[in-house]
């Protein structure tokens, strides 16, 4: 009589064969390589825009001052850094047009600048400072605590103190706004 192998015996034989094969197989080594990877983000520039012309309005002769808005000023910082920035303002003298003899000149020392409240985008703290006597560049806005790209905008008010003997006419001067 022929005896069939039992299923349990066949399974034990298969496990034994697999274990013997595993012991005889060469060990497989594990390997790894690291790749140092870099990329760059390039920064842009720091710019300022100001209105090209401004009209402070009109006052009667004998008035003590004339005052009005200069229009929007915007600093755009696309450098993508933590560097802050500062804005300075200076003015030329104001000279009356069309007066040939002894024209009235209002010196830049009689010109004052009030920046008003800035509006910010991005991460920046913009702080304004009033400046008087713009015959030399005066600090009027500082951007601090920067993180990446940012902007700040404000609408300054310019005030010109008038001499009591100012002649009637249209006065022209130049206000220069810079950022660094």
Image (cartoon, rainbow, N blue to C red):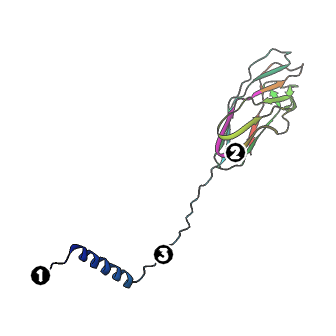
- Residue at image position (79%, 16%) is 59
In the picture, residue 162 is in which quadrant?
Answer: top right
Question: Given this view, does label 2 or label 3 mark the residue nearer the observer?
Answer: 3
Magenta-colored segment: predominant secondary structure: strand
Judged from this view, the residue extending furthest toward the right is 164
Give the x, y percent position of residue 159. 80, 25
Q: CA distance from mark 2 to mark 3?
A: 45 Å
Q: CA distance from mark 1 to mark 3?
A: 53 Å
Give the x, y percent position of residue 98. 79, 24
Which sits earlier in the primary sequence, circle 1 or circle 3? 1
Q: Quadrant of the N terminus?
A: bottom left
Within-10-Å neighbours for mark 1: few <14, some 14–19, many 20+: few
Number of the label disc, if any, that sits on residue 83: none
Number of the label disc, if any, that sits on residue 2: 1
Query: Bounds of the magenta span?
Result: 146-157
Give the x, y percent position of residue 169. 79, 20
Viewer-closest of 11 and 147:
11
Judged from this view, the residue extending furthest toward the bottom is 24
Locate residue 109 relative to residue 125 in the image: left or right: right
SS under mark 1: loop
Question: Given this view, does label 1 or label 3 mark the residue nearer the observer?
Answer: 1
- Pointer 2: what residue? 146
Q: Is residue 113 magenta?
A: no
Which sits earlier in the primary sequence, circle 2 or circle 3? 3
In the picture, residue 47 is in which quadrant?
Answer: top right
Viewer-closest of 105 and 102:
105
Q: CA distance from mark 1 to mark 2?
A: 91 Å
- Pointer 3: what residue? 31
Which sits earlier in the primary sequence, circle 1 or circle 2? 1
């Amino acid at each position: 009589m022929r005896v069939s192998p039992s299923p349990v015996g066949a399974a034990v034989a298969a496990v034994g064969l697999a274990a013997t094969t595993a012991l005889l197989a060469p060990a497989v080594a594990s390997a790894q390589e690291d790749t140092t990877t870099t990329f760059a983000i390039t920064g842009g520039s720091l710019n300022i825009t100001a209105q090209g012309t401004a009209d402070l309005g009109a006052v009667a002769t004998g008035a003590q001052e004339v005052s009005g808005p200069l229009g929007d000023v915007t600093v755009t910082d696309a450098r993508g850094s933590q560097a802050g920035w500062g804005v300075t303002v200076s003015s030329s003298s104001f000279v009356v047009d069309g007066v040939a003899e002894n024209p009235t000149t209002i010196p830049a020392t009689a010109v004052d600048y009030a920046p008003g409240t800035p509006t910010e985008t991005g991460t920046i703290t913009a702080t304004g400072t009033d400046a008087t006597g713009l015959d030399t560049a005066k600090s009027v806005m500082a951007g601090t605590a920067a993180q990446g790209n940012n902007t700040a905008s404000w609408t300054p008010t310019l005030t010109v103190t008038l001499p009591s003997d100012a002649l009637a006419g249209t006065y022209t001067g130049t206000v220069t706004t810079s950022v660094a």
